[in-house]
Image (cartoon, rainbow, N blue to C red):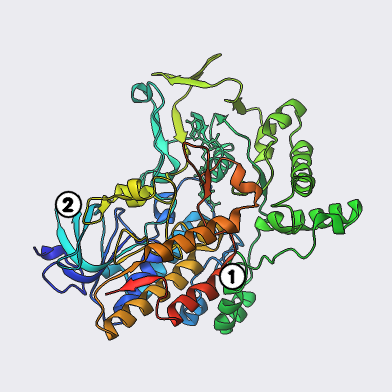
Amino acid sequence: MGTGERTPAGSAGDGYFDVIVVGAGSGGIYAVHRLAQQGLTVLGIEAGGGVGGVWYHNRYPGARVDVDSLEYSYQFSPAIARRWRWTERYAAQPELAAYFDFVADDLTARRRFLFDTRVSRAVWDPAKRAWQVSTDSRLHLSCRYLVMTTGNLSAARRPNFPGIDRFAGQLVLSSHWPQEEVSLRAQRVGVIGTGSSGVQVATALASQVDHLYVFQRTANYSVAAQNRLLDASAQELRAERLAEERQVLLGRPAGTSILRPEHPAGYYSPAEQQALLERQWAHGGQGMNAVFSDQGLDPAANQIVSEFVRNKIRETVKDQDLAEVLCPRYPIGTRRLILDTGYYEIFNQDNVTLVNLANDPLVEVTRRGVRTRSRLYELDVIVCALGFNAFSGALIEAGIANHEGVTFAEAWAHGPRTLLGLMSSQFPNLFLPTGAGSPSVLVNMILLNEFHMDWVADCIAYLDQRGHGTIVPTPEGEELWTAEVAEASATLLRRQVDNYMVHVNQDGSRVFMPYAGGLDRYVPKALQVAADGYSGFRLE
Ligand code: NAP
């Protein structure tokens, strides 16, 4: 069945494509470009109305990237780098959205996407060696290869608090912030959730609203981003040597300028430790996770960093009782570190109240607001920043199933199983760029998307050249890689702390879902697999 007038350029005309790419975020934009360049027929499908992925949907006030903008950029095109100028070290959402619009137009990638279209079902047909893809707009398409550039943090956790439907005010999700303006001035606003999204939106709203209630269940670590304006000359210089810069980033553990720390905490005197921590604080950013080589492994080393950041919170928040409620108690870096632009300062304002759900749990939402065990907070707007069904959420929502009807909910019931995080043994011809089992959310997403899509495009070219119609990890190949992913996180403190990167099985066993060995170690492994003729995969 054809796609009618909505078929974008590049279609074979009968609804059959070499590749269907799902998601028009940083990965999807590059994917359709890269694959079409290779002469493949490509269709992109995107649920939102435009490109940008998370930066299209998460347009809440205060949304801002937490990786340096210069690094959180496409690295493959000097032409793009020459013509784009970031204004801030950590770009805010409007600038990021403009960047993805700019790149999508520059690569003429936009015309390859169907927007406002959601994949509702994708089933592997072994006889036709094709994925049969259906959409909520009742399109029925098929493709040889399915590429899920849906991201790991896109399937939102939606609020299911008792009574939520009764709320008479406005309910918004940070992850699906409305396109139209949300009226916040002179309103009583509650933000539920204090991860990166909740912290950013609360910081932005504190100066706009009549009263802000921050509902915190677990205190998280947030460090000063030390955001600043960027000058143009450094960017021009960088654009001129982009290929080199790209190689440098691919050789770094997080695909950023952050290096592996050289020494354990014990190598330094207490005064030297504090000096290093102060230097990192002044520099700002995710580097607070990489001051000592053993801070992610040794509770005592970690405690030095944790206590340093807790003391910063105590220095900032005037009410010391309140500061203690805001002080996290788990080891720093075992959940994603939050970067902020003045979060703890808002709690010195009279119009901001912290509600400690750990002591006073949320019981229900009523017509008038949020009721905790001890009182009702009357609200005009509730902002839910509850996070995502990470990694498998988008794959499950897209209704992906193999020929036996096996879904990701079943295949990954005990945690993700992949080869290189790119493919899973029960799903032939399905690529999962930045997926679980790859460095994934631990690294620079744009860079990893580029690397993965180059790998995928090269892989498809290899298969086509040799007349192979399918590729899938062998059970042994998948087993070996899954064991390697487990090994990479075996001694990490972060595996023991509950958060969206850890899958906890009913028997209590824990699976750390991203590959924690670092991008620098991952890249040569992935390239070697390809150089060896896709060892660990079965090609037919
Ligand atoms: P998150 O880190 O998973 O945080 C979700 C928050 O919602 C947590 O505070 C959680 O509390 C709370 N929550 C969930 N269910 C709740 C319930 N039933 N009652 C009360 N509280 C509840 O999600 P996120 O903030 O969206 O961030 C996810 C990831 O997206 C980040 O780690 C980051 O990788 C990315 N992100 C990045 C940026 C950026 O700076 N560039 C911005 C936003 C997001 P508990 O901790 O107690 O579970």
- Where does the C terminus fall, quadrant-wise? bottom left
Question: Percent from the top left, x then y, of residue 294?
Answer: 74, 55
Q: Which of 330 and 202 is in front in this view?
A: 330
Is residue 61 placed above or below 373 in the rendered structure? below
Query: Helix or strand or loop: what does disc 1 sit on?
Result: helix
Question: The residue under label 1 is which amino acid type?
Answer: Arg
Task: Determine if the C-beta at disc 1 is less than 8 A from ligand 1.
Answer: no
Upstream in sequence: badge 1 or badge 2 = 2
Q: Mark 2 points at which residue?
A: 137
Task: Determine if the C-beta at disc 2 is less than 8 A from ligand 1.
Answer: no
Is residue 358 placed above or below 400 in the rendered structure? above
Q: Which of 468 and 37 is in front in this view?
A: 468
Q: How crowded is mark 1: few (under 14 residues within 10 Å), some or many (20 or more)?
A: some
The mark lying in front, picked from 1 and 2, is 1
Task: Give me the residue at 40% from left, 76% from top.
Answer: 534
Question: Percent from the top left, x then y, of residue 172?
Answer: 40, 36
Q: Mark 1 points at which residue?
A: 521
Give the quarter of the image for residue 276. Answer: bottom right
Query: Helix or strand or loop: what does disc 2 sit on?
Result: loop
Q: Residue furthest left?
A: 1
Question: The residue under label 2 is which amino acid type?
Answer: Ser
Task: Give me the residue at 68% from left, 33% from top.
Answer: 326
Q: Which residue lies furthest to the front in this view?
A: 476
